[in-house]
Amino acid sequence: MLEIVRVPVLSDNYSWLVHDPDSGETMVVDPGEAAPVEAAAAERGWTVGAVWLTHWHPDHIGGADAFRAQGARVLGPEAERAKIPMLGDGVGEGDVLRLGAHPAQVLTVPGHTQGHIAFHFAGDAAIFTGDTLFAMGCGRLFEGTPADMFGNMQRYAALPDETQVFCGHEYTLSNARYAVVAEPGNAATADRLAEVEAMRARGEPTIPTTIGAERATNPFLRASSAEELGQRRAAKDAFKG
């Protein structure tokens, strides 16, 4: 199985080091800055040979140029090439990437940005969702529509429950506080809020999550229509809890 290491960067971002112990290959998903990722890799004796980017936002690509200067390949959404100056190999829907013998399917998941992609390692029950699917939340609709994000949520919801979700931010506490307002009758959401509050009080990360947990408690994944998702996204944008 792949080894996946959470690397906190910037204020609330996560970059993800992914290592295949059989081949010795290592890549990083969304290095918002280079130094913490370099330190985490060096601590383990790993060399980052590739950078996989989900979208163009600076807090996800800020460290990519440093890794490229060290010889790493930089892969990311071809649709956002104009906004990712260090991009090497552009990819999109249906492409298959590999880390060692581990294949990852590229999914195009627009809405947060229009070229946003995700990386799904089905054989390892892992998906890297960037800023689309969060624990108990979804990304803001900066460049797309509620219909775009609803389509993404439907794709994610169809994945096996045990699929681990590796997203780009530690937003779970804020998301959970909104989720209990969005679905006041959902006991699972109330229970998860209490769990998340305790974890954060102890300084513990809440990521990764799982598709099963999101199916039970995420008001955006549970939305019944694009209209309902749009209403919930607008309400979350204004939420002060």
Image (spheres, rainbow, N blue to C red):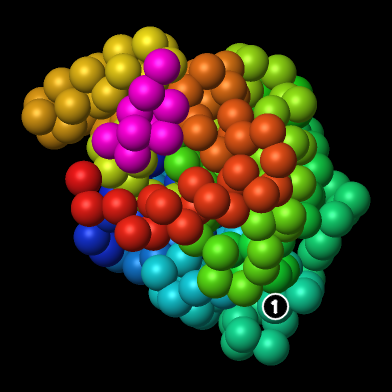
Which of the 4 image quarters holds residue 201? top left
Q: Residue at x 30, y 52 (%)?
A: 239
Decide if residue 119 is on the left or right side of residue 197: right
Residue 19 lies, with reference to residue 36, above or below; the image says above
Left or right position of 143 against 12: right
Q: Nearer the viewer, residue 35 or 79?
A: 79
The residue located at (70%, 48%) in the rendering is 226
Q: Residue at x 46, y 41 (%)?
A: 137
Residue lying farthest right?
A: 94
User: Secondary structure under badge 1?
Assistant: helix
Q: Quadrant of the N terminus?
A: top right
Q: Amino acid at mark 1?
A: Glu
**Nearer-the-camera pick, 189 or 99:** 189
Residue 8 left/right relative to 50:
left
Question: Which SS type dominates the magenta stretch?
Answer: helix
Quadrant including the C terminus: top left
Question: Is residue 170 shown left or right of residue 76?
Answer: left
Magenta segment boundaries in residue numbering: 177-185
Residue 210 spot, x, y in % from top left: 53, 23
| Residue 39 in view, yes or no | no
Q: Mark 1 sits on what residue?
A: 80
Residue in view at x 47 percent, y 23 percent: 217
Q: Position of residue 75 (x, y in %)?
A: 69, 65
- Quick one: 211 or 186, which is closer to the camera? 186
Q: Is residue 220 above or below residue 186?
A: below
Residue 170 located within the stretch drawn in magenta:
no
- 2 or 9: which is nearer to us? 9
Picture layout, residue 119 above or below residue 123:
below
Magenta stretch holds residue 182: yes
- Residue 173: percent from left, percent from top: 26, 37
Q: Is residue 137 visible?
A: yes
Residue 205 percent coordinates (x, y) = 27, 33
